Image (cartoon, rainbow, N blue to C red):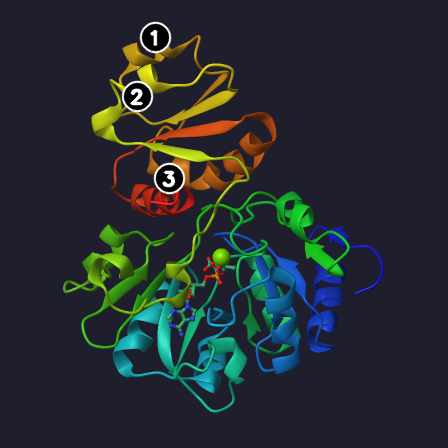
């Protein structure tokens, strides 16, 4: 693409500009309730190819397709009664469901898999863009592969300025981590923890499981994307486990600019002792708050500090998705 990237608030005219770009086979960034997406017409293999090139995305990592209606879902996927009931209950929302795909889907969206991942985002601008484009929109998170996902238009601009024609700026995203990816083949399994909490989904699907990390179970990655190092800031991210809370400070190096991220489970008196050792302390009041701010704070901190220390938070609700991302970003 030649020329400048336009950043526009979503309104009738910017949505219509976005939709006509999508119809022409261009790539447009847009907000969802989870993170920003880098969207293209899911039915146009050439447009989808641009997404892979822009992101530097591995060719074996399939893309989530976004729809604005159940009718649109049924054009691209085979939907059985159980999945349909679930989609109707949970959509629009941060839940991606894996379906058997229909022949209309180009092979590169799904990387040759017989399945397609689909969700209906709970964001007015996203839904309007899909509706007005008249086609399902394939969209991974709008970051260069491996970088923290974007939760604001500014983050998208950081990674793609001058490379895409339009970013719809819907402000900071509500949830801050990506959608939960669910497979209903065999035992229902979460392939990627995300914005739709395990606890909430378990109430709808009593026999729900969480897929183990591919390295631990030794099999192939279930959600191909989960095997890659992800979400990493440009400076080292150190995970401080709960058992190290009282001891890790004694091992810190001198002459390093550091920030400490911590939650309510971190002992307050230790904070006072660490005062001289960190330039900044960043407090997450619960898992939801950590999810909302995680990627933003990582992108901000990489500019200011040499190292980021993240003290383990409780793995409950959104805290699960946060810890999964922190482990991956820390290379664990
Ligand atoms: O919240 C989100 O999900 C955001 C917004 C933009 O919707 N999108 C997003 O996309 O996070 P991405 O590409 O960053 O992550 C998609 C994940 C990857 O782990 C990918 O491997 C998995 O979904 N996935 C996509 N299609 C799949 C399929 N057919 N079977 C299994 N996993 C699939
Ligand atoms: Mg991503």
In the image, which is nearer the foreground, mark 3 or mark 2?
2
Q: How far apart are marks 3 and 2 (CA)?
A: 26 Å
Q: Which mark sits nearer the N-terminus, 3 or 1?
A: 1
In what element is the residue under mark 2? Answer: helix
Q: Mark 3 points at which residue?
A: 288
Compared with residue 115, is residue 195 higher up or lower down, i.e. above or below?
Answer: above
Q: Residues within 10 Å of mark 2 (few under 14, many from 20)?
A: few
The residue located at (74%, 77%) in the rendering is: 24
The image shows residue 190, relative to residue 131, as above or below, that is above
- Residue for point 64% across, 67% down: 53
Q: In this view, does 241 lie to the left or right of 128?
A: left
Discs 1/2, front: 2
Q: What element carries label 3?
A: helix
Instruction: Determine the residue positioned at 48% across, 28% down.
Output: 307
Q: What element carries label 1?
A: helix
Give residue 326's position: percent from left, percent from top.
38, 42
Mark 1 vs mark 2: which is more N-terminal?
A: 2
Q: In this view, does 321 lie above or below 271?
A: below
From this viewpoint, is residue 231 visible? yes
Side of 157 relative to 296 (left or right): right
Say few, some or many: other residues with alpha carbon within 10 Å of mark 1 (under 14 / 14 to 19 / 20 or more).
Answer: few
Relative image position of residue 219 (x, y in whole percent):
25, 68
User: Which of the labelled discs sits on residue 273, or is there none?
Assistant: 1
**Real-space Cα separation, disc 3 to disc 1, in angstroms:** 27 Å
Residue placed most toward the observer, 166 or 68: 166
- Assess disc 3: are there few (<14), some (14-19) or many (≥20) residues with their C-alpha within 10 Å of its C-alpha: many
């Amino acid at each position: 693409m030649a020329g400048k990237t336009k950043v526009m608030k979503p309104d009738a005219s910017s949505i219509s500009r976005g939709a006509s770009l999508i119809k022409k086979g261009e790539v447009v960034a847009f907000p969802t309730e989870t993170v920003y997406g880098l969207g293209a017409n899911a039915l146009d293999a050439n447009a989808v190819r641009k997404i892979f090139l822009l992101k530097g995305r591995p060719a074996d990592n399939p893309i989530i397709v976004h729809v604005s209606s159940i009718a649109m879902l049924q054009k691209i996927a085979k939907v059985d009664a159980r999945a349909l009931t679930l989609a109707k209950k949970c959509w629009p929302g941060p839940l991606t469901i894996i379906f058997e795909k229909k022949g209309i889907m180009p092979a590169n969206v799904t990387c040759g898999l017989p399945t397609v991942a689909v969700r209906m985002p709970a964001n007015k601008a996203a839904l309007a863009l899909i509706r007005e484009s008249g086609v399902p929109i394939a969209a991974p998170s709008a970051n260069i592969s491996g970088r923290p996902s974007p939760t604001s238009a500014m983050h998208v601009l950081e990674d793609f300025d001058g490379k895409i024609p339009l970013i719809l700026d819907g402000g900071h995203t509500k949830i801050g981590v990506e959608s939960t990816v669910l497979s209903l083949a065999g035992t229902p399994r979460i392939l990627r923890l995300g914005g739709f909490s395990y606890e909430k989904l378990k109430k709808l699907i009593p026999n729900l499981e969480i897929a183990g990390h591919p390295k631990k179970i030794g099999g192939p990655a279930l959600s191909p994307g989960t095997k890659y190092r992800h979400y990493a800031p440009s400076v080292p991210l150190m995970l401080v486990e709960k058992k190290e809370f009282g001891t890790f400070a004694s091992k810190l190096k001198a002459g390093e600019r550091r920030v400490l991220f911590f939650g309510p489970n971190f002992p307050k008196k230790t904070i006072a002792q660490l005062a001289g050792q960190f330039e900044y302390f960043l407090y997450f009041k619960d898992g939801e708050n950590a999810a909302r701010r995680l990627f933003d704070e990582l992108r901000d901190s990489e500019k200011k500090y040499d190292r980021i220390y993240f003290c383990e938070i409780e793995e409950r609700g959104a805290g699960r998705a946060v810890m999964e991302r922190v482990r991956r970003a820390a290379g664990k």
